[in-house]
Structures are given as structure tokens and as C-alpha cells.
Image (cartoon, grey):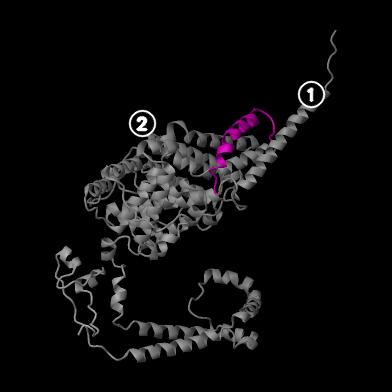
Amino acid sequence: MSDEKRPKVLSCVSCRQRKIKCDKVAPVCTQCLGANTECEYPSRKPTRRAHRPRQSELLDRISRLEKIVGKANPAKLKEVNAALAGHAAPTQSTSRKATADVPEPATEPSPVLEREISTDIADTASRYLSVEFWGHLCEEVEGIKHALDEPSEADDDDDEGDDTSPESRETSYWDGAANHPSGFLFGNPSYHERDQPSHPPRDMLLRMWSIYLRNVDPLMKFLHRPSLTEEIQLFANSSSRTISPSKHALLFCIYFAAVTSLSDEACFVQLGQRKSELASKYRIHAERALAAADYLANPNLTLVQAVTIYVTMLRSYELSRSVWVLTSMVVRLGQTLNLHRDGDGHNFPPFEAEMRRRLWYFIVVLDIRGAEDRGSDSILNKNSYNTNLPTNLDDELFGPNMTGPIAPQPSPAENIFSICTARCSSTFGYIAHPQAAEVAASEKPLHTEEELINHVRSLEDAFIHTANPSNIVSVYASEVARIVILKLWLIVQYPFSAKSTIIPLRASRETMLRTAISVMELVEAMTSGFWADRFAWWTRGYMQWHPLAVALAELCIQTEGELADKAWTVIDRVFPTWKHSVADSSKGSLWRPIRKLHRKAKEARAGSMMKDLQIADAQPRSRPI
């Protein structure tokens, strides 16, 4: 009896439903014993003798697939592509306008096009990957899919290792995280799956949350501080520390943000460890937590909040183009949740509608800042979303349980900075990216100097004249508004692209140089002194290369005078430090032309000074009596 092959015991019904590993201990497995649930083992169905025909069917289908794919000769694909390109070239320019208005069908080519192609390249018909080929291929793959969907005894073992259900993600959170593609999209060469991420001890967890509230939350107001503080305190005081995968990811992104917002010295004093070590640790933990929550395939509001925090802080952590690339992912995740089409938010409860619009407009800010950082086009334009601006309101004045409408408060609220950056980004992007302005229908296009002045005055009235000196966030928002207003004048005169949305202003070169200097001085002041310990991470995150380039260009012409002397004093201060915070570092493609411009401006100034010396030496000197 011992030599006979015993039938394999199947997992109990409870473990199979929960998608967890069953140790198959009789009469009650360990998982059911711990969960105090009924443990019932299913009886095995009678063995069917259908395995051989099923395998034969699969082999036949695979054989037919090989024959179909064999018709595609890779060596002659270039010839086919060349023939197709030659056929399409004459009609491309003439059909461009028509295709702009009429969407192209996404199903299959028209019969006329098929006949034209077959006529023009009849000699390659046997090698052309036609609709017939794809039809046969899809038919065969669909057949294989149906065949593989049939149950078998081996499915039981495969299912035990499948942790894709929500229940499984709750009980064994980190299992299978490496199998998600989400973990490999952050561009982190240090990413690994070796150590299981763990939350910090209670005191350190609460300290990092406090740091986040002080340094990050005032500038990124899309988390609700009161309700999240209550959740974090419950989590920190809990012995089991059970929380959803989305909240796990959000917490690790908060840890990463808190550490990144600190200086090296402040991090060591407040957290007792070096910033480089802690930031690297929690960056990887945040990436693993996001991957385990499967943020790409199953996004929700909490996960998009977490990803937005991660991508925003990543720009302060490193200089690579990862942030620029990942910003498009954040935009798509927001669009997946339809954050951009909320309108006035009447389809959602008041609290949820407000949190959605706060998150969406920060994504808009992230897009504009990323485009400015790289000198590229923005992803979004004002015609692509209709969500209302966030409400000027403190977090304590609304919450998840409110049912009535949300009304703004008269004085600057806690989220005044977010409202300021949202409005500034909207106007800034509209002017800096004319391809977006061309189709914008939400407001009148900015085509005259007077209209631009009206927009500038509205920003001044909303954020500068009403700034509350006792509210540090309000004062910081007013400084940002000043910088944006000055940069608007620079962009109109020196646009990012050849096509401008504004008629060139009547401004002298001295005015442009003075404006560029003012921007650099304001930015320099915001990264030191009064703001340094809290918000310098935000200001340093995006080096103002455009005003610097404008100033250097003007200094190639304006080589002398008090204004030129002042400009060089400012440039000599910022140039050595800004090259370390520019995108892709000082060796990147953005800094190289600035470095050349800097050298040319210095040569022009030196040449002017040398000319003055020569003129002075050439003047006759009076002889002593």
C-alpha cells in the first residue's frame, strides 16, 4: 500500500477562495485554524482520459501557426516596407488636411487600398503581411486561448501561487511584487527586490509625517491633513499595522518626500541618519510599494496621489530625465480616473470632488514645470480639461462626512499656494506653448499687450496684494506669482518656440535684462534665508535657465554700464550653483548652450573693457609744468 501512488490532496475551499497557500493539514489547515474559519477539502473529480486529444489539438494549432508565421520572411520585410512607402508618399501631403478632420478607422484597410497595394506590389504578394495573415493569426490564437481555458488538475498548483486578488494583496502584501511591470518603470538603477520594505518605528514614522506636513504639504495640497493624520496615528499605534496596499504605497511615498525635503544637516539632526542613505532606502521602498499595489493596472485616487508625490520629489532627489518621462505617466493616470473631466464635480460627493480637483491641478502644475525644466512642450493644453479650480479652503473646514456644498473662505487658505501655482501654470503654459493656445476655447486668446497686462493684474490682485504677512504660505505664493509675472514678460519677448501668442512688446533691451536679473534675484532669495529650511527643495527643483539665458544673451550686446555690472554680479553668484541643479546636470544638453553663451558674454565684456583701456591709453597726457 505504501508503494502505491496516493492521490494528491487539493487545497481547501477557503484557501482557494482567498488565493493563499494551503498546507493541506487534516482535518483543519493552519490558515483556516488561524482565521477560525471552516476548513473543507474538495473531493477530486474523476480523472478524464482527454489529455492526449487536448495535447494533440494544441500541437495541431501550433503547427498551423508555424506555417502562417513562416509566410513572413524577415529578410524581405525591408523590400515590402519600401514598396509601401513609395506607394504612400504621393498621397501623404494631400490627405493630411482631410485626415485631421476625419478620424482614421482603426479596424482594417479599405478594399480599395487593398487592391491598390496588391496591384503595385503584386510580385511581393506571397510575402506581404496582409489582412488575411492577421485574420488567420487571430483566429488561431483565439482557438488556443479557448483550449487553454479548459480546467485541468495542474491548475490547482498554479492557482496557489497566484496572488492577484485583493484578499491576497492584503494578507501577503509583498509577495509577487517583482512580477508587476510597475516596479521597473521608475528609472532607478538601484531598484531591487532583496529586502522586504518595512515601516519605520512609531516615533520615527510620526516624526516623518510631521516633517511632511511642515515642508511638503503646504506646497502640495492634495492630501486631507486631518483625516490622514488620524489614519496614520491609528496605524502607528497598531500592533498588526494592517492597511490597504494603496495606503502602504502612500505612506512610503510620504517617507521619501519627508526625507528629500530636508537638508543633509537637518536630516541627520531630526532623523538620526544620513540623508543619502534614508532617501535611497525609502525611494526603493516607495517603488516596491507602488509596484505591489499595481498602480498602473489598478489606479485609484490614493495611488495617483502617491505616484504624484513620488514623481514630484524625485526631481529634487536627482537630475535625470526620469521625472520628465514619468510626468506623462502621472498625467495618464489622472486621466484614467477622469480627473480632467470633472467640471464642477457634481457627480461626486463634495469632499471627493474637492480632493480630485486639487490633485488634478497639481498634475497640471507638474506638467508645466516639467516642460519648463526641459524646454519642451507641455502634455496638456487648456482645451483638454474642464475641471474647476480648487476651492480656497482650510482642511479643517471640510471633511469626508460633509454633505453640503463647499464654499471658499475670504482670506488666503492653507491651499493658497496650490491655487496660485494652478492659475500661474495655466496662464504660463498658455503663453509658453502656442500649440495649446491655438485650440483653447475656455477663454479669449492672449493676442495683445493689454490682454496680457489684464492677466498679470489678476494674478497680482489674487496673490500679491492680498498676501497675509502672518501666513508664510501666502507670502511664499506671492513671491512665486512675482516670478511668474516677470517670466511672462521674458517669454513674450524671448519665446520658447518660434511661434508666439503675443504681439512683441515695446520693451527696450535694458528692460529685458533688468527683468531677467530680477527673476534670478528672487529665485536666489527664495532658496536661502527665510525660506531655506522649509521650501528650498521646491525652488531648487527647477533651475531658472531661461532668465539666465536671456541675461547672457543681452550681456553679449550690453557690455558695460551699471546694469551690466549688476547683472554680472548676480550671474557670478548663481552660475556656479545652478549648473548643479539644472536638468541632466552641467553635462546635459540644456546646460551646454548656456555655458557657451556664458563664455561668449564674458568675451564680449572683456573685449569692451580692453577697448576702453586702449582708448584711455591713446589719449594724450598733459606734461607736468
Of the two numbered discs 1 and 2 in the rendering, the one whose residue sits closer to the viewer:
1
Mark 1–mark 2 CB contact (< 8 Å):
no
Mark 2 secondary-structure assignment? loop
Residue at x-position 80% and y-position 26%: 615
Residue furthest to the top: 625
The residue that disc 2 covers is 470
Q: Position of residue 407 (x, y in %)?
A: 29, 46
The crowding category of the residue bearing disc 1, from other C-alpha atoms within 10 Å (few below 14, some 14 to 19, many at least 20), is: few
Indicate the amino acid at tag 1. Ala
Residues shaded magenta: 557-583
Q: Position of residue 519 (x, y in %)?
A: 54, 37
Q: Is residue 466 something that shows in the picture?
A: no
Q: Nearer the viewer, residue 57 or 533?
A: 57
The part of the image, by quadrant, that contains residue 38 is bottom left
Mark 1 secondary-structure assignment? helix
**74 left or right, relative to 141:** right
The part of the image, by quadrant, that contains residue 264 is top left
Q: Position of residue 72 (x, y in %)?
A: 56, 83
Q: Indicate yes or no whether the magenta region holds residue 460.
A: no
**396 left or right, relative to 510:** left
Indicate the amino acid at tag 2. Ser
Q: Mark number for residue 616?
A: 1
Residue at x-position 25% and y-position 65%: 167
